[in-house]
Image (cartoon, grey):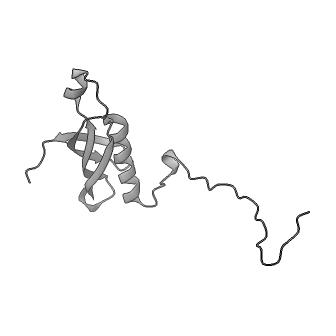
Amino acid sequence: MATKIDGAAEPQQPTAPVQMPLGPEMARPTSRLGAARAAIRDFLVHELDAREVRITKIVPHDHADTGWTAEAEILVLNLEVKMLGLPLTQEVLEREHYTVELDSDLTVRSYEHREELPD
């Protein structure tokens, strides 16, 4: 049995670390807009191997419940550098722009690679 010294705090029991959910459970969308953003991000990461995704525009089709159209900027591996097979210490990425259309079930209806817009 531990004795308490006057003025000293009682020893505290160690607490378990807080478990942060990983993967799809990490950020559960709470709105239709959030669900659409998550579906677009998931498509670009898994299908186009995007390293980073920035959704620059997202709007519902005709302001109805028929789907979404989004524009996104992604960073992907530069295939020309990759094909050269050079020994690199870091990945060389390039910026690409895409338009993605979702149907009302948040399934990708179409996507299109867009040329970079002039500044």
Residue at horizontal 47 percent and vertical 54 percent from the top: 27
Residue situated furthest right in the rendering: 1
Residue at the left extreme?
A: 118
Return the residue found at the far bottom: 7
Q: Is residue 43 left or right of residue 114?
A: right
Residue 108, position as x, y percentages in the image: 32, 42
In this rendering, the answer to whether 34 lies above or below 86 is below
Q: Nearer the viewer, residue 66 or 80?
A: 80
The residue at 31%/32% (across/down) is 89
Q: Nearer the viewer, residue 79 or 114?
A: 79
- Residue 114, image quadrant: top left
Position of 87 compared to 80: left or right?
A: right
What is the quadrant of the C terminus in the image? bottom left
Which residue shows up at 52% across the image and 47% down it?
A: 22
Task: Give the image location of residue 60, x and y in percent.
Answer: 28, 57
Residue 68 locus on image (x, y percent):
29, 53
Q: Residue 5 appears in which quarter of the rendering?
A: bottom right
Visible residue check, residue 106: no
Of residues 76 and 57, the one nearer the viewer is 76
Q: Is residue 23 at all visible to an observer of this figure?
A: yes
Q: Residue at x 25, y 35 (%)?
A: 92
- Residue 106 position in % (x across, y down): 37, 48
Identify which residue, 97 or 13, lies in the foreground: 13
